[in-house]
């Protein structure tokens, strides 16, 4: 999970990197509902395959 400034307010997201730490990554921005474990696991799988 990451936090970042968005128009003066803190917003949440999820950052998934490939296992080696290099290559394409996935960044999910949280909408008004929370990021679920299922959604973050899909992001992890996408990042893992590049």
Image (cartoon, rainbow, N blue to C red):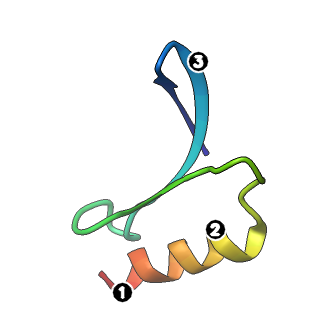
Badge 1 marks a residue whose secondary structure is: helix
> Where in the figure is residue 40, as x and y percent of width and height?
63, 68
N-term mark: 3 or 2: 3
Give the side of residue 27 with respect to residue 9, left or right: left
Q: Nearer the viewer, mark 3 or mark 2?
A: 3
- Real-space CA distance between mark 1 and mark 2, rounded to the nearest whole angstrom: 15 Å
Q: Secondary structure at mark 2?
A: helix
Q: CA distance from mark 3 to mark 2?
A: 23 Å
Task: State the residue position of label 3.
Answer: 9
Q: Earlier in the sequence, mark 1 or mark 2?
A: 2
Q: Earlier in the sequence, mark 1 or mark 3?
A: 3
Seen from the viewer's position, the closer of residues 47 and 29 is 29
From what the image shows, is residue 14 above or below residue 11?
below
Quarter of the picture holding the C terminus: bottom left
Q: Are marks 1 and 3 in contact (CB under 8 Å)?
A: no
Above or below, 7 against 29 in this view is above
Dot 3 alpha-carbon crowd within 10 angstroms: few under 14, some 14 to 19, many 20 or more: few
- Between circles 1 and 2, the one closer to the viewer is 2
Q: Which mark is residue 49?
A: 1
Residue at 48 percent across and 25 percent down: it is 6
Label 2 sits on residue: 40
Q: Picture coordinates of residue 7 (x, y %)?
A: 47, 19
C-alpha gap between disc 1 and disc 3: 33 Å
Which element is circle 3 on?
strand
Question: Toward which corner of the image does residue 23 lie, by quadrant?
Answer: bottom left
Q: Position of residue 49 (x, y in %)?
A: 36, 87
- Give residue 48's position: percent from left, percent from top: 41, 80
Q: Does 2 sit left or right of 18 as displayed? A: right
Residue at coordinates 51% horizontally, 12% vertically from top-left?
A: 8
């Amino acid at each position: 999970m990451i936090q970042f400034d968005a128009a003066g307010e803190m917003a949440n997201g999820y950052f998934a990197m490939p296992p080696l730490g290099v290559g394409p990554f996935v960044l999910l921005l949280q909408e008004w509902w929370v990021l679920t474990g299922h959604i973050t696991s899909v992001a992890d799988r996408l990042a893992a395959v590049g």
